[in-house]
Every structure is written in structure tokens, then in C-alpha cells.
Amino acid sequence: MQSRRTFIKSISAIAVGAALMSGGLAAQAADKSPIKVGILHSLSGTMAISETALKDMALMTIDEINKSGGVLGRQLEAVVVDPASDWPLFAEKGRQLLTQDKVAVTFGCWTSVSRKSVLPVYKELNGLLFYPVQYEGEELEKNVFYTGAAPNQQAIPAVEYLMSADGGGAKRFVLLGTDYVYPRTTNKILRAFLKSKGVADADIMEEYTPFGHADYQTIIAKIKKFAAEGKKTAVVSTINGDSNVPFYKELGNQGLKAKDVPVVAFSVGEEELRGVDTKPLVGHLAAWNYFMSLKNPANAAFTKKWADYAKANKLPGADKPITNDPMEATYIGIHMWKQAVEKAGTTDVDKVIAAVGGQKFNAPDGFTIEMDPKNHHLHKPVFIGEIKADGQFNVVWKTKGPIKAQPWSPYIAGNDKKKDAPEAK
Amino acid sequence: MQIEKLMITGLMAGLLLLSSAAHALSPESITSLTTGENEQRIDAIASVVNSGDSSAIPFLKNILNDEVKLADGKILIVSESGAIDAMTGEVVTLPEYPEDLINNNRMRNELDIAIAALSLRSSDDAVRLAAAKKLQQTSTSEAMLPLVRQAEKSEKRPKIRTLLVEIRAGIELYSSDKQLRLVAAHELAGSTSAQIRQSLTSRLELDGETDPEVRLAIEAAIESIEERLGYYEFAGTVFTGISLGSVLLLAALGLAITYGLMGVINMAHGEMMMLGAYSTYIVQNLFRQYMPEWFDGYVLAAIPVAFIVTALIGVVMERTVIRHLYGRPLETLLATWGISLILMQLVRTLFGAQNVQVENPNWMSGGIELSSNLVLPYNRIDIILFSVAVLLLIWLLLNKTRLGLFVRAVTQNRSMAGCVGVNTARVDTWAFALGSGVAGLAGVALAQIGNVGPDLGKTYIVDSFMVVVLGGVGQLAGTVYAALGMGITSKFLESFSGAVLAKIIVLVIVIIFIQKRPQGIFALKGRSVE
């Protein structure tokens, strides 16, 4: 009896909720009340190191849009929640954003595991999520737009560079990562790619460390040993989060120089190097779609805007303001959403989704980049940078222009049959 | 008049000195070194090396240090004092947007080798040694052979000579003369360099040495090098094990006092370490701002500061919260956990959620190179010494002082100690302060090897408890054995099973051990416990 009553109760609650939601949407279209925008980034816990900056960047962009008149003549209102680096809490907070706050769009998540956690919620409630971080691909959802890189926009070009004469002509590879879905999948793709280039299994070493691993002595010793066994060796690092600091410190202390064994990293940017003395690390590499050191007018304006904002709001680290790739991706994502809403003339999720594809934006990476009309990913340029003594990057290689994302990597079996567009409902 | 003239000549002389470096190179080589594709620049470097002209070194170093910039078709050498034209040596004003001359790893490597090759005839022993070391560690081309032979002939120092012999032999492995190759293989057998082994292997496998006699000699050389490298590798594993053990020991020592001796399950122990690390950060910043010339000494100053800060916080914690909860372990656990959350959030509010940068002082960066595959980093060595010192101090304090006597008395039998006039409440406060202070010291050390952020404590709290429980509650000696045991075991496991599996195996071993022997490695004997 009891259970049936609660069941009926919850049913009616959902019904009321749905009614309120649709009513709210109808009302919004007419009035000039602010549009609510959700920001779902960890402000505490392990990932706070990376995600806090994205929250601030989102707030800055919203501020900027509001100052220039808002969207459809309405102001944006940010709703910031803190999922505290706790993956299930991401789903809970996402649901809260959609049902209680009724946000029109959400910008958020960093780790793939957090994105996978909110995904069912956004599908169920037909929400809209912009995800700003490079990831392993193998996903294409109607409710998500991916403004970070897919593997072919970061990992594969980086490894190709290492194999080229300028990159050192590496013949042996150490695939080193944190033990979770992103590094494992990326390394699976890279292994298949290396094999297609004629690298034998014996010339690939794969190593994983737990989240938050802090003692890299043995790993570095192993890399040295592997490198000494013959042929030029390079390390591909998918270490994520704050483990990078002890890793690079150990690298410097053990005297493993970039000239001998270069390390290319996919999750290390300007922000992650903040806590490291970069002098011994000069020459190690990172592959991204944006570097703060890029010289072009759009980036000059972007970094200045950020520096001013950080100073005005007294953000931590404002004395040395830093921008990085996921921050740029956040900035692009919010602007693309704004343009799509203006094109659609409404914040209705389905209409906005239809309008995002094909949007163009003059991005700080120096190119006018475009959201693919079909596959929900951006066409992005790829840059490879070497770490400089001041913690910035020297771009040593770049693509001629933006390249199209392949969320379904051709190096994973069975992907050739998958469609380059999300499944229609 | 006279003075003016003097000044002008002085200035001219200074300019000449500045520019003499650049003058030594022909304008053509300066142009080809700095313009064009990487391939062309590398060719230019090779031809400079072939000329053997050591006066090219300063300009090569300028390129290597990113001091060379391009502007309006001119090649400029930019330093803090200004810019000079590389061709003419004239002082010029630096244009607003000079173009950087970009060197990637490959260019830097070539430049390094070129500088080393040209420095082989330097009159300075240290410079020659460094150059020879550098060349021995990289693959050298045949073009350098004359340069190396010449240097070998004139070299008096045996240490540098050995290196030069290895370099020459490394090149001669590819000679067309069979006899030369054979001699080279024999000469290389005495090396301890992983690089040499690598070039021997590649000679054998990739480039296909065909002569059976030479093949045998190379194989024998590889074997003898490998044997020697094996010893170093083993020594390296032991060292990393001891190093991890010393970190665990430092992290656990404070807990060995608060939990081991006093029985307080202090979940905020990790946060005490975190506060110690942040104290280090603050001291570092103060030094950087007010006494930059003493910067390298900041770690030493941070040690007492961290101890006092965390000990004081320990006193406050004990007086306000823990004191009322003695004998109620569950409530203590919850209360201290709550305190840990408060402290973490406090730090987050004060310093931000992001990690802060703690720089290693110069004397803690780098390491002692025992062989090509064994480098003992200074920061690890220092931490091992530091943990021994802290351990010694605590042992002295507990066993040789009146306070230590009281602490031991109170932990063994509280009511009896109270009966004979020990102020047990005060002893509790002192002991807790000591435990917290030691955790602060651990924080100073951890700041040198890892992240300093609000979550620092979480990483170490589980390991600390594991060490204390494994060692046996109420025993310092047990803590030492447990820390070293865990450190060395996990490093040996890591070297063949990988870090993830090693962690699991160590955990399983600890669980089995505690099942079989719940009292830990050492247990206090007699009736005194509990």
C-alpha cells in the first residue's frame, strides 16, 4: 500500500514538474526575464585544480555576453553548482539544474567518467550539455556538443610528430597513463595506430598508475631502461590531474632530458604546470588545439580580457593569469550556443541543437572554426608545443588549418560501420 | 677632455668584447645557422663543427639559449643589456616585435653536440669533462672522428680519456676496417653506459654487422655491460624503496604518537601535513619577496615554522575537542574527520582550490649520477636524511627527557601515572602537539616531492594508518620497520607488476598480515596495555 502511494505521489510530482517546465518555457519565450545557464564544474576535490578555472571562464564569458546586450535581448543568469569531483554527484547536480533551476543549457564536466555519469540524465530530460575537454571519442550523443578535441585532433597528430625527423624520429613508445577510461581508450587507439605504422608490440610499453599517484621513481627508472634497450624512444603521457606534478618533478631530478626521451602530454597545459618548476622540463611537449602563447589578434584580446576579469574579481592566481585549451573551448562553446539561440530565436533545446551545427566563430586559436553540421564536434587546428622555461609553450608544429573530428576512431575495430551523426530519437 | 676620451675607448673596448664572439664566424655561416628550414640549419651546424673553430661556441650558445632574434632582415643577439647585430657586432635598438628564432628538441640536440665537440680542446678540465660526457651519451657521427681522435691524443686526464676512447670506439664500430671494429668492440666492453649498449645492440641488429668474429666480440661486450647495469638497477630499486619508505615513515611518525601512543584516531592527521606544506609555501614566498639572496635556505627556515604552526593547531584541537572525547574512539573519529574537512575548506578559501607552487631550492634539484641508469636525486637523499633525523629526535625526546617519561607513563597506565602526581591532562596536550608538529615536518618534506594543495592530506592518511597498524600500535620501532618494509616491497613489486597491481598486492599482504598478527610486527608485552 505504502509503496503504491509513494509511486502515485512521485508520478504526480513528475507530471507537475513537466507541466511547470513546459509552462515555464512558454512564459520565457514571451518575457524579458533572464535565461538561466548551468555551470557544472568541480570546485572542490581532486579535479578542482583544473575545473575551477573553467567555471571562472564561463562566468567571464557570460559577463561579456550580458554587457553586449545578452541573448535575444535577455540577460544570462549563471547557476553554479559544485559536484565536488564526485562522479555520481555530477548526475544529481545535473538533474537539479534541469528540473529545479530549469537551465536552458549546461556547460560542464572534465573527466570522461563525470560526463558518462550525467549523460543518462541529459538524455532522459532532454537537456543540452557543452563539454569542453579533449577526450577519447567513442561517443556521439544528441544532447551533447563536444568543444574539446577527439583523438584524431590531438593524440594521433602528436604521435605522428614524434615519428617525424623534427620530432626526433621515435621508434619505440611508452604509453603512460592514469588508470581510467580516457587513457585506456586513447592508448588502445594509439597502439592500433602505431601498429599500422609498423611499430612492433615489443617496442610499445604500456603503464598505468592509480589516480593521485605520487611516487614516480620506479616508472622513470623503467622508462630509462626501456629507452636504453635500443632505438629512439618517446613517452606519450595521458596522466591526468595533479599526479602530473610529481611526475614532472621526478623527470627533472632524474635527468631524463627532452632531447633524449621526449614526453608528449595530452592533459598537461599551462594551468597544470603552475605547480612545477619548468626549468628542467624545457623541450618536453604537449599537444593541444590552443596555447596561451599563440600570437594572433583574437588571442591577444582573449588573454587580455581574461587577465582583466581575473584582476577585477580577485581570482586566485590573478597575478599571473593563465589561459589554456579547455578554457578556450569553454569560451567557444558558450559563444556558439549564443549564436545558435539567436539563429533559432528560442532557447528550446531541440531547436537550438538543430541550429548549433554549422555555427562559425573567430576563435582565439587564430582560425575561424566551425561546428560540424552533423557530428557535434568542432573542426579544430592542432598545435604541438614545447615547454619553455617560463611555463609557456613554444609552438613547434601545427596543422595548416582546422581538421574535422573523428569521434569514432578508425583504429578501433567495428567503428567503420558507425554513423558520423548522433542517433535520431 | 681626457676623461671623455678614456670613457669612449672604454666603451669601444666593451663593445669589441661583446661582439668579438660574433665576429669570429663568417657572415655566411651566421646566416645559414639562423635561417631556413631545420635541415639546412643542421647542415650549417655540421660544417661549423667540421671547421673545428671553437670561436663559434658563444654564438651557438646564444642560439641555444634563445637569445638570437630576427628583425627587419637583421640577426640580433639579445641580452638583458641590449641587442647587438650578430654580423657587425654593433649595438642596435631592439625593434618592438622581434621574431623568435625557434629551436625544437632536434635543433637543441644538434647545437648541444656541436658545442660539446668544439669544447673538447678547451683548456678547462671541467668543460672538457662535460663535453666528453655529453658526446658519450649521444650518437655521434663519423664526421667528428678526427676531432675526437685529436682530443684523445692530447688528453692527459684519465677520466676524460676513458670517455673519449668510448666515443671514438662508438664511431669506429661503423668503420669499414674489420680490425678497427674488433678493437672498438673490446674497448667498449668496459663501459657502464646504457647508451653504449644501445649503440652496440643497434649495430648488431639493425645495421647488421656481418663479420662473425666482430659479432662475437660485440655480443660479449653487451653481456659485460648488461651485467654491470644490472647491479646498478638493483641498487636503484633498493634506493627508491628506501626513499618511499622514508616518506611513509615521515607521514606515519606523527600518527605513531597520536594514535600509537595516545590512542586517538586522528583523521585530521593528513591535514596537519597539508598545513605543514602550506607553511613551507608561505615561508618560501616570504623569502622570495624579502630575502631573494637567501632563497635557497627557505626550506631550513620552513622546518621550525611548520612545526610550530601545526603544533599550535594541535594544541587548540586537543584543548577544544579531543580532550572531551578520550576513550570514545568512534566520536573522536567523527570529530577529527569533521575538523579535517574544516581545515581543508579553510585552506581552499584562503589559498584557492588550485595547487600552489613550491620550488625546490637549487641544492635539492638534480642528483648524483652513479651510472647512466642510476641517478640518486638530491631531494630524495635529503628526505631520507631528514626522516632519520626526525626519528632520532623523537626517540631522544621519548626516551631521554622528563616529558618523554611522562608520555610513556600516561600511555601505559593513565590512572597510576595520575596517582603519582603526573598532570595527565597537560601531558596529553604536549603529546598531541608533538604528534601534530611532526606531521607538519612531514608536510615540509612532502612539499618538496609532490603536490601542495588542499587535498594533500587525503593521499597520505590511509598509508599512514596502514604503517602504524602494521608496525604495531604503541611502538616506534615497529613503525620504522613497517614503513621501510612497505616501501621496499612495493617498489620491487612495481618494477615488474606495474604501479596499479603493486598497490593492490601490498594491500593484500598487509591485510593477510594483520589477520594473522593483529598486534602488528611488534607488540608491547605485559599487562600495561589497555
Image (tube, coloured by chain):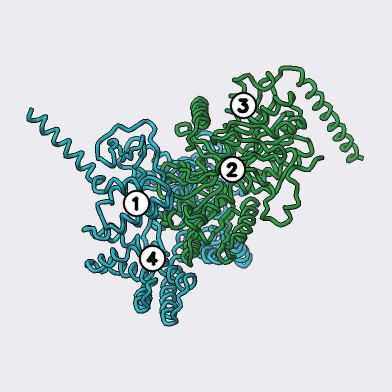
Chain colours: A green, B cyan
Which residue corresponds to mark 3? A62
Q: What's under tag 3, amino acid-wise? A: Ile
Which of pointers 4 and 1 indicates the residue nearer the eye? 4
Q: Can residue B12 be seen at all in this image of the molecule?
A: yes
Mark 3 in CB contact with mark 1 (< 8 angstroms)? no
Using the image, determine if residue B454 lies above or below residue B153.
above
Q: Is residue B190 above or below residue A371?
A: below
Mark 2, residue position: A47
Q: CA distance from mark 3 to mark 1?
A: 47 Å
How far apart marks 4 and 1 lie (CA) works out to 20 Å
Viewer-side residue, A117 vs B202: B202
Residue bearing the label numbered 4: B371
Separation (CA) of disc 4 from disc 2: 39 Å
Please name the residue shown 59% across and 28% down the image: A61
Q: Which residue is mark 1?
A: B363
Q: CA distance from mark 2 to mark 3?
A: 23 Å
